[in-house]
Image (cartoon, coloured by chain):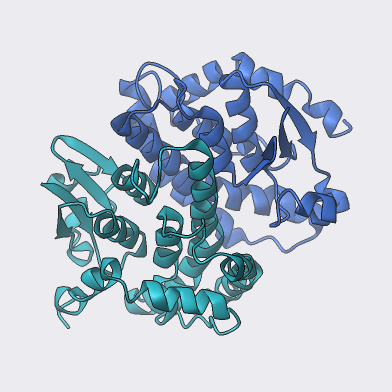
Chain colours: A blue, B cyan
């Protein structure tokens, strides 16, 4: 069976899990214990030589990188149909979410949450830059969701899943999404769907909480 | 005719130009004068509402984001064949180049080249982090190119073009690629091909040099 390797605190891990659920794929979740360094052990490096999560194994086919796994799982389905112009629009919003939202959310999340946990220095300047770039970019998403129920038309695509994954640290990173009512409404609706609740219902137990 | 909007100092602009050349597409290059703020004027915002380069117009179809444009130009060709497993491997190395090479090269390039030009503060810590992450990640590329002439097999794909674009600031950012002989050899060979020389032969004149 197709296996997806992940860690609940790795938000690039979330995209492949959401995609597997939304695409109705049969799969097995395998948590990689990053805290104990399981990702640097030979058996995991045989799956992903970079030693990162997420990773995927489908029979003898191995894949790393969140976006590559998401496209592999969704290709040819409604989430990512085989049509160059549809794929182009989905790719555009997918990459917008990764480069202009996720990368900046990651700065804030790292410095507000991860750095204090691991005892690394907190870079206040990086937090402020991240928040500035987020507020430069989310208005484009807000405008888009004011005119369209999903990022690319009337149904959910890989682009929406990419943005949902990018906003996973909303609470822990203390992001303020209140200036974006359409985005907030869209996010709340998506988080009530089974592709999302199926993944999140297990996280407390997986983190030993 | 298909139009590609770019600026020679924007290295995310390079991927679409290389792809258009390598895919043998008929296209017109349109330089967007970022220094004068042409990217924030209404006629350009009608093409790309984010006000960034690169962007593409193909008839009445508009596209933004470097990776989305590259995939659109290459899809179904040898650079990015219509086969899920081939696309997966290409996507993996494409994303590796973007997330683990380009993003770190960008840190170094920004602080060593752009910040001094625009009079912004130089973040020495960001330079050191960028160099560290580059040297953490390029060994994976070096290992790959020791066993395979291209990142994904025996012929050039979108993955190679992504990595070539990511390494465009090699000289200006003063990157030391000497620890990576296979990468250096591969890069030199690719830079002698017409997809590359066709783009670079005009840059001096375009920059008014």
Residue A148 lies, in percent from the top left, at: 34, 21
Give the vertical position of B195 relative to B94 (above or below).
Answer: below
In the depicted view, which residue is nearer to us: B17 or A153? B17
Quarter of the image that includes the C terminus of chain B:
bottom left
At 22% from the left and 55% from the top, the residue drawn is B24
Residue A18 lies, in percent from the top left, at: 61, 27
Query: How many labels, in total?
Result: 0
At 47% from the left and 73% from the top, the residue drawn is B186
Locate residue A130 relative to residue A141 in the image: left or right. right
Q: Is residue A21 visible?
A: yes
Locate residue B138 relative to residue A143 in the image: left or right. right
Q: Is residue B121 visible?
A: no
Q: Residue furthest front?
A: B154
Locate residue B128 relative to residue B192 in the image: left or right. right
Give the vertical position of B156 relative to B124 (above or below).
Answer: above
Give the vertical position of B151 relative to A117 (above or below).
Answer: below
**Toward which corner of the image does residue A16 lie, by quadrant?**
top right
In the depicted view, which residue is nearer to us: B22 or B148? B148
Residue A161 lies, in percent from the top left, at: 52, 29
At 59% from the left and 14% from the top, the residue drawn is A193
Residue A153 lies, in percent from the top left, at: 34, 21
Give the vertical position of A15 relative to B145 (above or below).
Answer: above
Locate residue A204 relative to residue A179 in the image: left or right. right
């Amino acid at each position: 069976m197709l296996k997806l390797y992940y860690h609940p605190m790795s938000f690039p891990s979330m995209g492949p899990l959401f995609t597997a659920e939304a695409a109705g794929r049969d799969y097995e979740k395998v948590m990689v214990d990053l805290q104990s360094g399981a990702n640097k052990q030979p058996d995991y490096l045989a799956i992903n030589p970079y030693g990162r999560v997420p990773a995927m194994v489908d029979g003898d086919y191995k894949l790393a990188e969140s976006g590559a796994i998401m496209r592999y799982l969704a290709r040819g389905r409604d989430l990512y149909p085989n049509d160059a112009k549809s794929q182009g629009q989905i790719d555009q919003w997918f990459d917008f979410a990764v480069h202009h939202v996720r990368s900046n959310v990651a700065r804030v999340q790292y410095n507000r949450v991860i750095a204090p946990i691991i005892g690394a220095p907190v870079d206040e300047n990086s937090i402020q830059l991240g928040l500035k770039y987020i507020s430069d970019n989310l208005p484009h998403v807000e405008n888009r969701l004011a005119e369209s129920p999903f990022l690319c038309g009337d149904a959910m695509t890989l682009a929406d899943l990419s943005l949902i994954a990018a906003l996973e640290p909303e609470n822990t990173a203390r992001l303020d999404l209140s200036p974006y009512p359409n985005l907030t409404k869209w996010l709340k609706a998506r988080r009530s769907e089974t592709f999302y609740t199926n993944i999140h219902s297990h996280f407390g137990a997986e983190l030993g909480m």
